[in-house]
Amino acid sequence: MELLLLILSTIVFFFFLLHGLDLYRKRRMPPGPTSFPIIGNLLDIGPKPHESLAKLSEKHGPLMTIRLGSITSVVASTPDAAREILQCQDEVCSGRMIPDAVTALQNHDKAILWISANEDWRAIRKALNTYLTHQHKLDTLSDLRQNVVDEMLEFLNQSALKNELVNIGNLAFAVVVNQISNTCFSRNVTNYESEDIGGFKTAVKTLMEVDGKFNIADIFPILKPLDPQNIRRQAKAAYAWLDHVVQGFINERLKHRELKLPRFGDMLDSLLDYSEDNVQVFNLIHIKTLLVDLFIAGTKTSSNTTEWAITELFLNPDMFAIVRKEVSTIVGEDGKIQEEKILDLPYLHAVVKETMRLHLSVPLLAPHKTEKEVKLNEYVVPKNVQILVNVWAMARDPKYWKNPLSFMPERFMKTEVDYKGQHFQFLPFGSGQRMCPGIPLAHRVVSLMVVSFVYHFDWKLTHAREDMNMNDVFGLTLLRATPLVAYPISIE
């Protein structure tokens, strides 16, 4: 009997001890809304999580704790909170929460977006900085991207002659896919018609869709083996398709090099050279995974920004005219717009920046994770806690932006605020060591497409400007709820 009482007393003691430790831990964490058992704060999060989290932060503060199922998250909603995470505690907060869909990617542990900041990660970043985003390399490969834009212009001229309606978002997507494929492989992988040659666009769009879906397996990891929404299976099929295609390009290039044929001088050649000199840390698996990453990460975000920029210019004819006039000053005698010259057009870049602010492609940065216990301001956050940075809330905060819901490119004409990660009220590409490495390429791709749409064509909408639907849909990127379609009218 005494032994039984001792055992019961010990159990009760440890129960209250653990309960007390849990309460202590919660008191050290940032405040947040009261959560329900099992589901946590899921009922507080609507179909647009970035908006729901922004409203909750108004009540609970710039650093807020929420629980989604079994996953505890800390949400940053102000520039100061973001700076604390992405700059002051960047090293500790640079881990990644890997969505279940991503595990369908073969060798996802080599994908730069998801791996820890280890030796592999540093080798991949070095390759990207040297062979993709360095200004000299971008200039060297600009003709390949220009050829893609010339093909797009020919497609639009034919559409104008036939008085055919153009889906601008789909067209921009195909252009970005081909610009990236030309940068990497010196060839197109799709065309500008509605059909999908070879399934390339379908594979990329499938991954953008499934990766952006709410996945119950991510918030209740015990369900991952069941894949209850069929998300991982869909992702696996699309990843496998892309993996097979990219591996085919690599094999073809290796045979080309074995035969000592002339080099293409594109990114694939450069990565293979780099691999030969750094085979211990950067091999063919790294190359394939990196190229698949580029197509997934670089296509929809750039085409989405282009579609929103054109939408705003259609709604503001005076701004459309200013961009066209500015572009006319750098057009060559052959009527072409050279990529490197558009880098000196201040109003164009103000339009692109304002588009990125008001229509952020990625409203919540890819989830970070604490690598160990860390102090964030006066709070203590344990190891392996997910961190969400709500850059959408910061980009619309009236404390930092006058008339934040209005499209006003002029706000960027007399300010040093840019998207390079040092101005925390404006982080379309993130900040710190996890910042998107493709900024220089994305900047050129989007700018060249916008000026091409504006300079070479007038456009006729299918409805009045005031009837334009400006709603968006949350996913891996914030998409227009309704596609932007218009009739091109050639002015040449």
Image: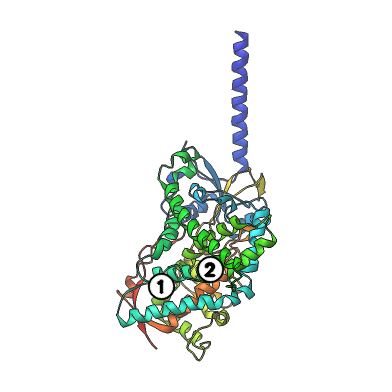
**Residue position for label 2:** 185
445 or 294, which is in the foreground?
A: 294
Q: CA distance from mark 2 to mark 1?
A: 31 Å
Q: Earlier in the sequence, mark 2 or mark 1?
A: 2
The residue most toward the top is: 1
Q: How is the image coloured?
A: rainbow
Q: Is residue 219 visible?
A: yes
Q: Position of residue 50 (x, y in %)?
A: 48, 55
Q: Amino acid at mark 2?
A: Phe
Q: Amino acid at mark 1?
A: Thr
153, above or below 25, in the image: below
Q: Position of residue 320 (x, y in %)?
A: 43, 81
Q: Position of residue 491 (x, y in %)?
A: 38, 87
Q: Residues within 10 Å of mark 2 (few under 14, many from 20)?
A: many
**Residue position for label 1:** 311
Q: Is residue 475 visible?
A: no
Which residue is drawn at the image coordinates 50% and 56% (left, top)? 243
295 or 252, which is in the foreground?
A: 252
Q: Position of residue 381 (x, y in %)?
A: 63, 45
Is 405 on the left-hand or right-hand side of 127? left
Q: Secondary structure at mark 2?
A: helix
Which residue is drawn at the image coordinates 34% and 70% (left, top)? 468
